[in-house]
Image (cartoon, rainbow, N blue to C red):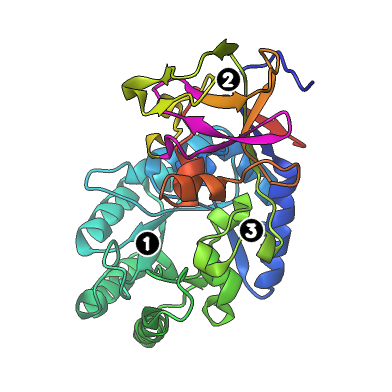
């Protein structure tokens, strides 16, 4: 009998993360490696994952928000770091003083970073982002010459240094999508124009996880793997994690909080969407949508208990859900495995993504702070 005295937890295998980083670096041998640790390293714990990625050869860290970047610096994460999701009035000066590279997509941001650099008495390292077709952040081609020219004028004053030119794919996880080639062509044109105007960038970068895995022509000077670093495939269309030799880093487990016999015809959880077909055993798993377990997986989410797959019975509640164990009677405290690498017969995060009609990114990233991260092989 597999029992545990511990509560629910997300076990994070840092040895697997290091192995994934090394594998991904082999996919892009001529490029620097940025370990993307935004959103608390996709739910895996940003500081521990940043350190493990550095140990495996990552030369950059990438985060979305200034708060993430400054928290990592305050915790002792050194080396090059890029922060890209800024809003007006953001802590530009703090980022400059913390030696963080910043992204600029428009004139307002260039004005603010220049003012912050002047106040700090320092030079800001800037990556100019081009919108090559994703339509989110990034500078439109029509506005690009002016943004580049103004950045170079500020560079001549010593306020900024343009160290990067970058963009982001819209559909790199859909092999053969026509937008991929179109974005690469536009990226070449926009970075080429910047070079002709006088930009001497250290790094050009556009490759996310799917591009790192499948588009060597997009690797340029630096690649930015996110989800693949955590051992997960970017999309079912590309294959599973095993197809790429990746190992999932997170294993989500919980002890059964209660095991009880119930008669047939017994309703289970809110709304009685599930009614027991006969006498059976129910197991209570102390995790719910308050912990990031997707409510959309009610009635379909897979769980391994004592070596057997079971399915969520009825609705997933805020703090708990139920599995119908059939005739099995595991002891309270027996381990329920929601997902993991899969080599012990357990479901994967990809299985949960299918069950919730979602994506694997959401499954791991949404696991809440109430679930302790236990970092192994640190």
> Which quarter of the figure has residue 192?
bottom left
The reply to whether discs 3 and 2 touch (Cβ–Cβ < 8 Å) is no
Find the distance from the CA under tag 3 to the CA under tag 2: 36 Å
Report helix, strand or loop for mark 3: helix
Decide: is 78 above or below 192: above
Tell me the tag on residue 141.
Answer: none
Q: Nearer the viewer, residue 194 or 156?
A: 194
What residue did someone put label 1 on?
160
Crowding at mark 1 (Cα within 10 Å: few <14, some 14-19, many 20+): many
- Residue 12 is situated, as x and y percent measured from the top left of the image, at 66, 37
Instruction: Residue 55: tell me if it is visible.
Output: no
Count the numbered circles shown. 3
Q: Nearer the viewer, mark 2 or mark 1?
A: 2
Find the distance from the CA under tag 2 to the CA under tag 1: 68 Å
- Residue 18 is situated, as x and y percent measured from the top left of the image, at 72, 50
The disc, 3 or 2, on the residue closer to the chain's N-terminal end is 3
**Magenta segment boundaries in residue numbering:** 297-322
Residue at (55% x, 82% y) in the render: 217
- Residue 378 is situated, as x and y percent measured from the top left of the image, at 75, 36
The disc, 1 or 3, on the residue closer to the chain's N-terminal end is 1
What residue did someone put label 3 on?
241
- Residue 334 is situated, as x and y percent measured from the top left of the image, at 69, 19
Q: Nearer the viewer, mark 3 or mark 2?
A: 2
């Amino acid at each position: 009998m597999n029992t545990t005295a511990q509560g629910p937890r997300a076990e994070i295998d840092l040895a697997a993360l290091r192995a994934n980083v090394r594998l991904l670096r082999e996919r892009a041998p001529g490029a620097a490696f940025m370990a993307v640790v935004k959103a608390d390293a996709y739910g895996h714990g940003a500081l521990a994952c940043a350190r493990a990625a550095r140990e495996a050869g990552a030369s950059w860290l990438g985060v979305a928000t200034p708060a993430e970047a400054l928290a990592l610096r305050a915790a002792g994460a050194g080396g090059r770091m890029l922060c890209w999701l800024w809003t007006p009035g953001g802590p530009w000066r703090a980022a400059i003083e913390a030696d963080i590279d910043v992204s600029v997509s428009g004139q307002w941001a260039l004005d603010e970073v220049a003012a912050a650099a002047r106040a700090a008495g320092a030079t800001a390292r800037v990556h100019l982002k081009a919108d090559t077709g994703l339509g989110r952040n990034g500078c439109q081609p029509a506005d690009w010459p002016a943004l580049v020219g103004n950045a170079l004028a500020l560079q001549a004053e010593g306020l900024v240094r343009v160290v990067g030119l970058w963009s982001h794919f819209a559909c790199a996880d859909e092999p053969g999508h026509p937008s991929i080639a179109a974005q690469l062509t536009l990226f070449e044109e926009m970075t080429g124009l910047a070079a002709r105007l006088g930009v001497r960038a250290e790094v050009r970068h556009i490759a996310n996880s799917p591009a790192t895995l499948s588009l060597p022509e997009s690797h340029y000077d630096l690649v930015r793997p996110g989800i693949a670093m955590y051992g997960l495939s970017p999309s079912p269309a590309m294959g599973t994690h095993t197809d790429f030799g990746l190992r999932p880093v997170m294993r989500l487990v919980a002890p059964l909080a209660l095991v009880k016999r119930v008669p047939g015809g017994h309703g289970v959880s809110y709304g009685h969407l599930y009614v027991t077909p006969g006498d059976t055993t129910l197991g209570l798993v102390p995790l719910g949508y308050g912990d990031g377990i997707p409510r959309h997986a009610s009635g379909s989410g897979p769980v391994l208990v004592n070596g057997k797959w079971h399915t969520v019975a009825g609705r997933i509640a805020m703090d708990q859900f139920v599995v119908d164990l059939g005739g099995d009677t595991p002891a309270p405290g027996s381990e329920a495995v929601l997902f993991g690498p899969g080599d012990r017969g357990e479901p994967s995060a990809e299985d949960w993504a299918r069950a919730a009609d979602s994506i694997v990114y959401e499954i791991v990233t949404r696991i809440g702070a109430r679930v302790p991260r236990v970092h192994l092989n640190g």
